[in-house]
Amino acid sequence: MLIIKCKGVKINHKYDACEFLHAGNWGDSELIEHQKFHKSLENSDYDWLGFDTSQPFGKFSGRDGKRM
């Protein structure tokens, strides 16, 4: 299971955050519906930035204690 968040949108060259978070997997119906929502609004002044996943807790790179 992943924590997937919406990166937001760029409207008239300004970034606008989106509060959408989903705990699940790629391809879940909630993600598809959220993507359809943003895609329906896209035009020359509105660009959707897609999804991003957060780092899983407890997974470290082994170097300097930093996460991968």
Image (spheres, rainbow, N blue to C red):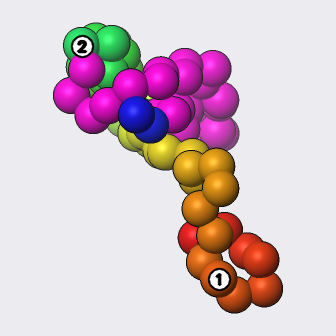
Which label sits in the foreground, 1 or 2? 1
* Mark sitting earlier along the chain (1/2): 2
Residue at figure coordinates x 65%, y 39% from the top left = 14
- Looking at the image, which residue sits at the far right? 64
Tell me the element at label 2.
Answer: helix
Task: For the N terminus, give its image quadrant.
Answer: top left
Which contiguous range is marked in magenta? Answer: 3-28
Q: Which residue is denoted by mark 2 in the rendering?
A: 29
Distance in Å between CA atoms under marks 1 and 2 = 36 Å
The image shows residue 24 at horizontal and vertical percentages of: 38, 25
The image shows residue 10 at horizontal and vertical percentages of: 54, 37
29 to 65, vertically: above or below: above
Report if the CB atoms under discs 1 and 2 are less than 8 Å apart.
no
Query: Can residue 60 be seen from the camera position used here?
Result: yes
Task: For the C terminus, give its image quadrant.
Answer: bottom right
Residue at figure coordinates x 69%, y 87% from the top left = 63
Q: Of the residues shown, which amino acid type is indicated by label 1?
A: Gly
Q: Which residue is denoted by mark 1 in the rendering?
A: 62
